[in-house]
Amino acid sequence: MLKKAFLIVVFLLVQFTTVFAQNREPVLRVDVPLDSIRLSDPFILADQKTGTYYMTGTGGLIWKSNDLKKWTGPQKVVRTDPASWMGNNPMIWAAELHPYRGNYYYFATFTNRAVKIDTVGKNIIERRACHVLVSDNAAGPYVPMKDPIYLPASKPTLDGTLWVDTDGKPYMVYCYEWLQNGNGTIEKIELKPDLSGSIGEGKLLFRASESPWSRQNEEGKIGPNKVTDGPYLFRTGSGRLGMIWTSWIDDVYTQGVAYSTSGTLDGPWVHEKTPITPPNHGHGMLFQTLTGNWLMAVHSHKNQNGRYVRIPRLFEVDFSGDRLVVGKPFIP
């Protein structure tokens, strides 16, 4: 547990470093190899309209590439409202880019560190929530829409993603954080047709403890892990609805997959018994390249010259059949 606690502290330090970097104007770099970029929670949009790959993630910045090999960036693309609940210069985590009905939408987790919403044990919980911004251009800028909030102010939520279910309605699928509820969940909430706000209340899809592969050692007792992180939805070639999501096996960041037996977000969700990625890889998403191949983007981490860094990685994937199969690493 001491080792895992240390890793959590290091994770928070990485996030704090990220927000400080957000407050500065980034230095534009060109022809940067993917494995030279330091980025948590990478998300890649292959935009057919512009013939360009756009990569974002934690930090609220965008990188651009024509071939996945060499990247230009980072560039600021987010314009938040300082008069909103986010305050000045909110932390931005786990951003995603989604084209939808003629616009581009920026799903991200925003944290206002100046506002405390709860204290659970020794954990002081800051105002943190999923939110959606919009642009008519994949490269941004992304700006707020109508609704001031999407999820309750009293709940720390994170890692929101977009899914249009079989009822034709758009939903945000997100994590309700374990720091408050003690057993992290993945939930859904319906979005307005133009994604400008939410409708109704969130609904539970599953809890972290339901996974057979995510485990933790707490005071010598091995049991279910508490963490839910990074959900991303997909449908296999056979029509099966799947979700990749990330947790921990003791102190190792790891990704697994669950499938909905009903084919809808409502589940029930059945988890595969073993992880689908190698140890130290997680927060994945799937994208189709401009040439038609499917890849998974994840991050791994390492200690580089005494500094903890996260690095985007790509894997070949095949989900043309009944299940997602992760193949070998893809080197652009």
Image: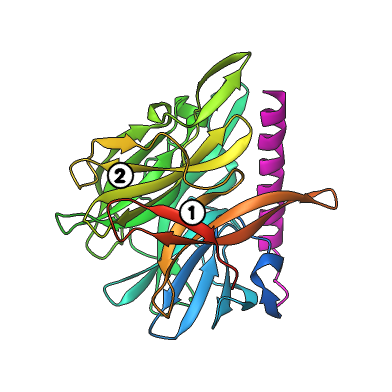
Numbered range of the magenta stretch: 1-28
Q: Is residue 67 above or below residue 93?
A: below
Q: Position of residue 120 (x, y in %)?
A: 54, 23
Q: Amino acid at mark 2?
A: Lys
- Picture disc at residue 37: none
Find disc 2 in the rendering and name its residue: 188
Q: Is residue 234 shown left or right of residue 211?
A: left
Q: CA distance from mark 2 to mark 1?
A: 18 Å
Closer to the camera, 177 or 79?
A: 177
Q: Is residue 47 above or below residue 6?
A: below
Q: Residues within 10 Å of mark 1 (few under 14, many from 20)?
A: many
Find disc 1 in the rendering and name its residue: 284
Quadrant of the rendered image containing residue 151: top left
Q: Quadrant of the C terminus?
A: bottom right
Could you say whether the residue bearing mark 1 is in a helix, strand or loop?
strand
Q: Position of residue 128 (x, y in %)?
A: 50, 44
Closer to the camera, 6 or 103?
A: 6
Kindly identify the residue that appears in the image at 46 percent across and 54 percent down. 326
Can I make out residue 145 in this image?
Answer: yes
Residue 229 part of the magenta segment: no
Residue 20 part of the magenta segment: yes
Quadrant of the rendered image containing residue 202: top left
Can I make out residue 78 in this image?
Answer: no
In primary-sequence order, the first of circles 2 and 1 is 2
In this rendering, which labeled residue sits more in front, label 2 or label 1?
1
Query: From this viewpoint, which residue is outermost toward the bottom?
Result: 50
Kindly identify the residue that appears in the image at 16 percent across and 59 percent down. 168
Q: Amino acid at mark 1?
A: Gly
Q: Residues within 10 Å of mark 2 (few under 14, many from 20)?
A: many
Closer to the camera, 56 or 302?
A: 302
Kindly identify the residue that appears in the image at 51 percent across and 38 percent down. 247
Q: Position of residue 303 (x, y in %)?
A: 77, 48
